Amino acid sequence: MIELGVLFGLMGVTAFALIVKLLRRNHTENVDGLLIEQASRVQAHNNRVTYSSAAIHSSSPTVRGHYRP
């Protein structure tokens, strides 16, 4: 029974520490950071489309991806 209390206690302390860390994290407030994040999201989307399993396995070797800079 003591082990169960210790387990739940450790899980509670860990959850509390994670909540505190997330609340104290600095958020991007300036426009430059938001533009960088937007560009990263667009690049990640293009990569997911270009290099998806269906795109790689169902195309001929000479067909290029639909990457648009």
Image: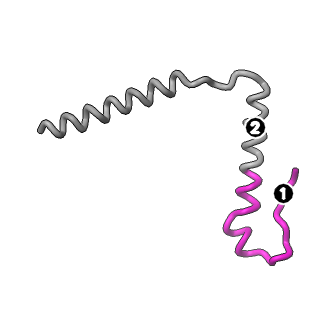
Image location of residue 26, percent across then percent down:
61, 23
Q: Quadrant of residue 36?
A: top right
Residue 60 lies left or right of residue 9; in this view the side is right
**Amino acid type, callout 2:** Gln
| Quadrant in which the N terminus is drawn | top left
Q: Give the range drawn in magenta.
A: 45-69
- Up-down: is 28 above or below 66? above
Which residue does the numbered mark 2 point to in the structure image? 38
Residue that appears at 38% across and 32% down: 15
Residue that appears at 76% across and 45% down: 42
Q: What element carries label 1?
A: loop
CA gap between label 2 and label 1 equals: 17 Å
**Residue 49 lies in magenta, yes or no?**
yes
Residue that appears at 75% across and 37% down: 38
Q: Which numbered disc covers residue 67? A: 1
Image location of residue 39, percent across then percent down:
78, 40
**Farthest residue in the bottom direction?**
60
Q: What element carries label 2?
A: helix
- Up-down: is 23 above or below 42? above
